[in-house]
Amino acid sequence: MLRDKTYWAQAADAYRAEMDSSYHRNRLAMVERLLNAGDLAGRVLDFGCGDGTLSERVLAAGGGVVAIDADPSMVAFTDRRLGESEAAKTSVGGVESLKDLPNGSFDTILAVNVLAYLHGGEDAAFYQEAARLLRPDGVLLVTHSNSLFDLFTLNAFTVRFFKDNFSVLGHHCRVEALLTRPDAPDRVPQSVRENPLAYGAKMVRYDLREVRQEFAIPHALPPLLLNENPDDLANREVPDLEFLPETEVWKKMFLCSVFGSRLVKA
């Protein structure tokens, strides 16, 4: 399930304080690459609106926005950011709140930095609702945690990836002996991961067709070799991999911890 209200209340202030960090600039630049001209000029649902950065962009583009977030302080912050605009409506809620919105009422749905926190079938419920809410040829733009990055981390997440994806007849491929630190990091990963290679095929079941992918948050080295605090986003420097030649762009699929997808209603 979506993390509880206590978690978001504690995380909200830190999240807003880090929005000008290299980490968030890199992630938002990926979102920009996924957007087409006119995507934000119609009726937009900003699900998991956070501090309202993208909702504000919608108003600037001449569109109307419904901004929803699970944390009341985020919604209050977005309210102040958007002002008294009649083109904006904000509310506190999660996936369950989408059921109150009418069919085919949005041209574009944004779900940025939120789907990785949907557990217990909430992600499937979100995709079902998104497909229902989109108008014909409407756009769903999402970002997600990249499970293929776990192959590059060479740590406990790598072990989990092999266990989850290469089990045969009840046995899994044991890579622990090949890794120097197979039990690190000792924190339990909370985010749901998706495989960008399989994501488009998965979305077909929801009548959504993937038309473009992009990647963000590249790592020059496996995280355990970087000697950095992964939760200290404000001071974390994210390298630029735009120098990669076209023949090596595929490496982003493994070096980047986040990917984004542009989907259209089939």
Image (spheres, rainbow, N blue to C red):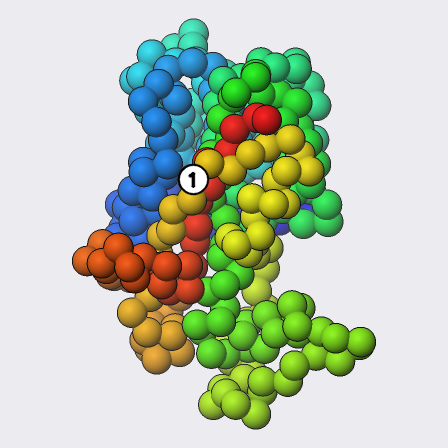
Asked if residue 139 is positioned above or below residue 148 in the image, the reply reads above
Residue 83 in the image, given as x and y percentages of width and height: 36, 16
Query: Which residue sits at x=57%, y=92%?
Result: 177
Residue at label 1? 212
Q: Is residue 72 left or right of residue 229?
A: right
Query: Which residue sits at x=51%, y=53%?
Result: 196
Q: Residues within 10 Å of mark 1 (few under 14, many from 20)?
A: some
Q: Nearer the viewer, residue 157 or 233?
A: 157
Residue 49 in the image, given as x and y percentages of width and height: 47, 32
Q: Is residue 182 left or right of residue 227?
A: right
Q: Determine which quarter of the picture holds residue 84.
A: top left
Q: Nearer the viewer, residue 47 or 243?
A: 243
Using the rendered image of the protein, determine whether residue 10 is visible from the camera's viewpoint.
Answer: no
* Amino acid marked by disc 1: Arg
Query: Which residue sits at x=59%, y=32%?
Result: 208
Q: Determine which quarter of the picture holds residue 105.
A: top right
Asked if residue 218 is positioned above or below residue 262 in the image, the reply reads below
Q: Residue furthest left?
A: 243
Residue 139 in the image, given as x and y percentages of width and height: 49, 26
Asked if residue 157 is positioned above or below residue 218 in the image, the reply reads below
Residue 30 in the image, given as x and y percentages of width and height: 34, 43
Q: Residue furthest front?
A: 247
